[in-house]
Image (spheres, rainbow, N blue to C red):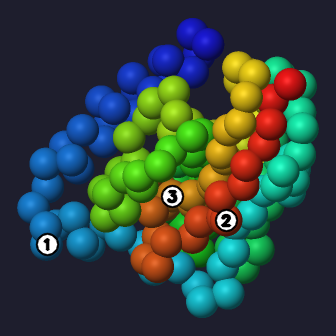
Amino acid sequence: MKAYRSAILASALLFAPLLHAGDDAQAKLVSEAPADAKVYIISPQDGEKVARTFTVKFGLSGMGVAPAGVDRKNTGHHHLLIDVDEMPDMTKPLPASDNLIHYGGGQTETEITLPPGKHTLQLVLGNYLHIPFKPPVMSEKITIVVE
């Protein structure tokens, strides 16, 4: 958890100026997504019952995965949204929180622990600056039940 918080702090310090960039400057930082780009959750499946601690596997087609900070065409990194009802501003860097987890190292799976009950999971692909692509490359939202 300490490494996770350090990564969030480093990202916040590095990308804080982008949050205050003007609309024109901000628009130039948004990356175009290929028409065939698709991100999806491999597992768990929609409606699946899982243990409190479980693995989420990320899928991506039509693009590649690269760590945050690597500006390479048609690549990005994953962000996992947990129980998020209202999408964040898709023209700015995604804010890190307990419900919006950044995988800026280029990870393609994670182990998470959630309390018992129903939860939703969704993936959004961000560019090298954590900004969602245009159009957004995001998975369907799935619902799981933690036993």
Which residue is at 45% across, 63% downward?
Answer: 132
Per the model, the C-alpha gap separating discs 3 and 2 is 16 Å
Identify the disc placed on residue 126.
3
Q: Position of residue 32 (x, y in %)?
A: 45, 80
Between residues 123 and 104, which one lies in front from this camera angle?
A: 123
Task: Judge whether 45 appears above or below 135 on screen.
Answer: above
Task: Tell me where residue 20 appears, x and y as whole percent.
Answer: 13, 48
> Residue most toward the left?
22
Which image quadrant for residue 24? bottom left
The kind of secondary structure element at disc 1 is: helix
Numbered label tally? 3
In the picture, measured across the screen, residue 13 lies left or right of residue 56, that is left
Question: Mark 1 is on which residue type?
Answer: Asp
37 up-or-down from 22: above or below: below
Q: Disc 3, disc 1: CB below 8 Å? A: no
The Cα–Cα distance between marks 3 and 1, rounded to whole angstroms, is 19 Å
What type is the residue that disc 2 sits on? Glu
Asked if residue 7 can be seen in this view, the reply is yes
In this orientation, does residue 67 appear?
Answer: no
Please tell me which residue lies in front, 10 or 91.
Answer: 91
Q: Secondary structure at mark 3?
A: strand
Name the element at disc 2.
loop
Sequence order check, earlier mark of 3 and 2: 3
- In the rendering, at what x and y percent does residue 89 appear? 32, 57
**Image coordinates for residue 61, horizontal then vertical, percent:** 76, 74
The label on residue 140 is: 2
Residue at 67% x, 65% y: name it.
140
Q: Earlier in the sequence, mark 1 or mark 2?
A: 1
Q: Hey, what amino acid is under mark 3?
A: Gly
Q: Quadrant of the C terminus?
A: top right
Classify the position of the N terminus by image quarter.
Answer: top right
Residue pointed to by mark 1 = 24
